[in-house]
Image (cartoon, rainbow, N blue to C red):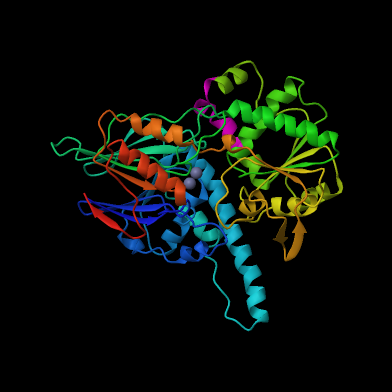
Amino acid sequence: MKIKFLGATECVTGSCHLLNIDEYNILLDCGLYQGSDGKENRNSEIGFNAEDIDLVILSHAHMDHSGRIPLLFKEGFKGRVICTKGTADLSNIMLIDCAHIQVTDANWKNKKREEKGLEPIIPLYDIKDAEESLKYFEGYDYDEKISILPNIKLIFRDAGHLLGSAICEILINEMEETERKVVYSGDIGNVNLPILRDPTPVSQGDIVIMETTYGNKEHKAVEENLHQLVEIVKKTFEQGGNIIIPSFSVGRTQEIIYALNKYVEQGELTHCKVYVDSPLAKDTTKIFEKYEEYFDSDAKGLIKMGDNPLKFKGLYFTESTEESIALKDIKEGLVIIAASGMCEGGRVVHHLKNNLEREECAVVFVGYQSEGTLGKKILNGDSEVKIFGEEIQVKAKIYNLEGLSGHGDKKVLHNWLKGFKNKPNTVFLVHGEGDSINSFNREITSKGYKSVIPKKNQEFIL
Ligand SMILES: [Zn+2]
Ligand SMILES: [Zn+2]
């Protein structure tokens, strides 16, 4: 068996790992590089021959894990994409949206290039490519043993990170003496998140590939962060401002709605208007409602009592661009949740432009901000940021509720690894930057784990 690390090496985006078992080539995820620090340029070179791939195992529907699957098909891949049912449904929305962004981006860049007399660039893929690839997605249940290739089986366990997100257990030569298990963590969820269950512990594995997004940080408890959010909303409203929450349309947005639902219905938040300004969020919320079986016990309890936790008085979904633009004229009393989560495009950028210069407003980050993104710059305390070519002063209050992140903190990661009764032969660390991945590596090495931080394109024979 061989494994080659093609992406998310010493960074958090572009997840893609190639497993070679007997004559079979299996890809674990095929995600996009994101962030405006040049990493995006890596997207066009996938680094292997797409026709040689037999199968893709997809851990979850986030773009940094799935966003290059249409490109894979465009380059000649003809196999199946195996994922959970929830991931298959979410991918239907998200990959089409991503294709749309690719095309719009390329058109915008080409206008600029034409002015400079440069050759046009071709989008990574278009909507047709995305639609074509989606025909090959196969959704399965959690905990089901799936025969994917001769002598290779797969089980998805709930990763608690996003609806449908999975930890992938790959069982090789199961009936023979040489049985081995590769465990790919995908993204490991936070504990006590609204709606989602906690990540599933895994007790056995020979080779482990795990994420380290927050390998050096401890989050505040989710409950504490939610209280803080309510206080921020109250205070900002008193001061006559709006609250902007940059959030992925898929996942984090539904969790925030769920949390606000509770405070509105308990009467703690009054006269609160929440606008979910994303054409994607409405469709996604419908998918969430379809998968109540994946919810944690609290959310299931509310539904049993007849309360839909994703609906409340004062919650609005805007779809058209006109509705979105109209929000510009409302100066106070709004909570606007809009994508993208790292402020790298999407409607949130317009809302930031309209509200960042007003000191009575607030921006609340609820997810990871990667290096080089606009979100990271605002979070870092830059007093001025560039938006649509204009210098915008940052006067609004900036809050970081990292505890609402979909990623477990270092404690969650350590606990998950401790769940293995015997130490795995090798733990490969991916999906982490700088001190986060390095300090996690140091800590587990000191506890006797054999761990490796693979470099891009590094291959290991196991
Ligand atoms: Zn993710
Ligand atoms: Zn990820």
> Residue at image x 47%, y 57%?
70
| Residue 238 locus on image (x, y percent) | 84, 33
The vertical placement of 393 against 197, above or below, is: below
The vertical placement of 232 against 108, above or below, is: above
Q: Is residue 183 visible?
A: no
Left/right of residue 350 with respect to residue 328 in the rendered view:
left
Total labels: the figure holds 0
User: Which one is nearer the viewer's eye here, 153 or 167?
Assistant: 167
Left/right of residue 453 with respect to residue 372 in the rendered view:
left
Residue 296 in magenta stretch: yes
> Residue at image x 63%, y 84%?
117
Q: Residue furthest top?
A: 305
Quadrant housing residue 105: bottom right
The vertical placement of 461 against 158, above or below, is: below
Secondary structure predominantly adopted by residues drawn in magenta: helix
User: Which one is nearer the viewer's eye here, 107 or 286?
Assistant: 107
Left/right of residue 186 with respect to residue 97 in the rendered view:
left
| Residue 255 locus on image (x, y percent) | 61, 33
Residue 300 in magenta stretch: no
Q: Residue furthest left?
A: 177
User: Which one is nearer the viewer's eye here, 111 or 284?
Assistant: 111
Q: Is residue 85 visible?
A: yes
Range of magenta residues: 285-297
| Residue 6 locus on image (x, y percent) | 37, 57
> Residue at image x 31%, y 39%?
446
